[in-house]
Amino acid sequence: MIAATRLILANLAVAIVAFALGALMAVMQAVARAGVQVPFGSARMYYLSVTAHGVLEALVFTTFFIMALGYLVAGTTLGRVAGLKWAWAGFWVALVGTVITTLAILSGTSTVLYTFYPPLLAHPAFYLGATLLVVGSWIWCGVMIGSYRAWRAAQPGERVPLAMHGMMTTVIIWILATAGLAVEVLVLILPWSFGLVDRIDPIIARTYFWWFGHPLTYFWLLPAYVLWYTVIPRVAGGRLFSDSVTRVVFVQFILFSTPVGLHHQFTDPGISSGWKLVHTFTTYAIMFPSLVTAFTVIASLENAGRARGGTGLFGWIRLLPWRDPFFASVALSMLTFALGGFGGAINAAYAMNAMVHNTAWIQGHFHLTVGTAVALTFMGFTYWVLPRLTGRAIAWPRVAMVQPYLWFVGMQFFSIPNHIVGLMGMPRRVYTGEYQDVAAAQAWIPLVNLSAIGGVILFVSAMCYVGTIVVTMLVSPRGERLPMEYAEAMAPPEPGPSIWDRFGVWTAVAALMIIIVYGPPLYRLHTMARFPSLGFSPF
Amino acid sequence: MWAATGMLALFLGAIVVTAIAGSAHPPSHVETVNPDTLRTIGEFATPGVTVNADGGVTVAMRAEFYVFRPEVIRVPAGRPVTFRITSPDVLHGFQIVGTNINLTVAPGYISEATTTFATPGEYLVVCNEYCGLAHHLMQGKVIVEGAP
Ligand code: HEM
Ligand SMILES: [Cu+2]
């Protein structure tokens, strides 16, 4: 039995419940925007629902799923999770925080969206709950690092398995990211929301938020990459392209995922264009490991297809296991991510950004990346891991087989119209796009309706997933547990640890880079003559 | 690896060249203002269009709970138009649909962007930063008038 199975299942359960609630909110949003009457439909409910959907999907579902995956990887590659008591404590702290924040949102006193930009002011419980969720995740970081160090001490001179290497980079990125969030929430927002100080500077708060917000996306993405690199080649019947190249890729994410946040603030006042240009450079640096990932993962799939007897330039593709729900989820995720990455290059382009900033294009974009590349990979992974954790076979194999394709189709319907309507100028986060029927806004309507159809297909797919998982856990009989195996590399790793396994060194370099690219603009903001703002709660 | 490096060099080259040669920068004005007295003191107390010595115009604007002031803005075609905009309450957005004018509006800060409208006509202005329950009702209009 895999170490810490109950802990892993508990974290997975919270993740899946959050996902299901978030999906329910989302389908109502998608059809409400198309003018369909939904229960309790009103602007107030719409923005409340968008707040809940953003928090539940982007923060709760992802964080709990990643914590589960982290414990699984530690348990299987290192043989044990050190400090199980702490791990359970972290789980409960994060869960209590999640419940508090969710109740604050549902009470209608915290409709500030998941980005909670001051001077929008929510109920203090909203920020307190979010803080507890992050504190719980910090305990997870501690347990992961502790497990890794215990293993290193017991196995001197051995190289940590690749999957754990990837999870350690995820842990480090999360620590670097949440440092910015901690300043924003603990130093600026909490005292202000409790009334201890009455003013806050919105641009400074935003700058700390995006110090957190961009590496957040890599915190989501890297665990998916870990599965693409270390599990999927085996599922497909092939081998990983190269162990050593993969380690270099992971370390590059430690270096480049944080010092880039100003690319979310291209349109902001108060920050000069020189520093925005610097962050543009670092942003393009991070496309390098992403492109290498695309090439090497495809190479390992080609290896699998040829091992199955595929020939010719494309003949190997047909022979891949397209009926396996985990494989199909990941293959479709990768395809979707290619589209998303292309759009991302436009978002990040310094001057082109003004065409798309805060338009519906953005919601189209991140539903391709986190909403599909990450979420669909995680869903597919559940089908693969449950029989290995519990010995229960997936209850409805045919539903599981179709579900990833349904998600993929639904997402194209949802996302492509959102991209187009965004280019036509429709803003994101609006209850309706009517704008008193001016001609420019009239032209958006058919596309919004099309995206609503996509939303319904997505919801059906989400319910197929949740239903299959729930029935599997409740009804499927326990049998033999399948073995949990990782892919072997075509080029095996050198035996001993190398410079790419020195996490301490790379974390220090990353911290230095953050100081270099954030120090001067933040120093200037903090020291210039400013007029901080009172709080407002217009909801 | 080489393909990845090549693609990146191309992207970055394009950005640096346009940033330097065409001065294609994002809006990055650094100037602060007191949001508490916005409605009573200074250029934002009487928002509107003023004509500059060079024939261009400057538009001083407030974005505030659910309206742009002024709601209707008349500017000439073919001349440089500078928008200066700030907020007395929360964050708002200022986006002129069909152009690349797209600004974050923050209390305490003045956002600025300059453009030249080539073609006369009416443009929709929307708020694209969530600002409260009537965020979707916040709209304005820019009317670009033909050269006299
Ligand atoms: C059932 C499938 C889903 C549907 C139909 C859906 C639909 C939507 C819609 C209609 C919005 C509001 C757009 C707006 O008014 O700006 C939205 C926002 C969002 N969605 Fe989804 N979504 C789904 C799944 C997901 C998943 C799986 C994730 C992430 C893991 C996700 C992350 C987000 C985020 C972060 C926002 C932004 C909220 C905000 O603007 O404050 N969604 N989604
Ligand atoms: Cu507004």
Image (cartoon, coloured by chain):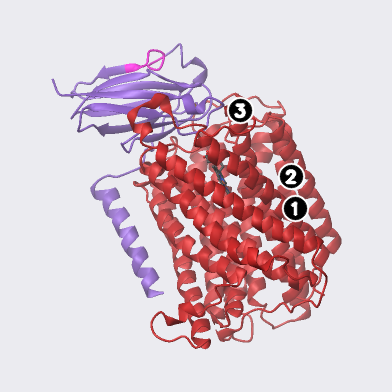
- Cα distance between the residues tagged 3 and 2: 22 Å
Q: Are marks 1 and 2 on the same chain?
A: yes
Q: What residue type is labelled 3?
A: Arg
The magenta segment:
B42-48
- Cα distance between the residues tagged 1 and 2: 10 Å
- Cα distance between the residues tagged 1 and 3: 27 Å
- Is A379 drawn above or below residue A208 in the view shown? below
Q: Which is nearer the N-term, disc 3 or disc 2?
A: 3
- Is A334 drawn above or below residue A300 in the view shown? above
Q: Which is nearer the N-term, disc 1 or disc 2?
A: 1
**Residue tagged 3:** A44
Whole-percent x, y for residue A148 in the image:
73, 70
**Residue tagged 2:** A98
Marking on residue A14: 1
Mark 3 vs mark 2, foreground winner is 3
Q: Is mark 1 within 8 Å of ligand 1?
A: no
> What residue is at 34 percent from the left and 47 percent from the top?
A352
Chain letter for the residue marked with disc 3 in the picture: A
> What residue is at 63 percent from the left and 29 percent from the top?
A121
Picture quarter with the N terminus of chain A: bottom right
> What residue is at 64 percent from the left and 50 percent from the top?
A178
> What residue is at 23 percent from the left and 21 percent from the top?
B52
- Indicate the colour of chain B: purple
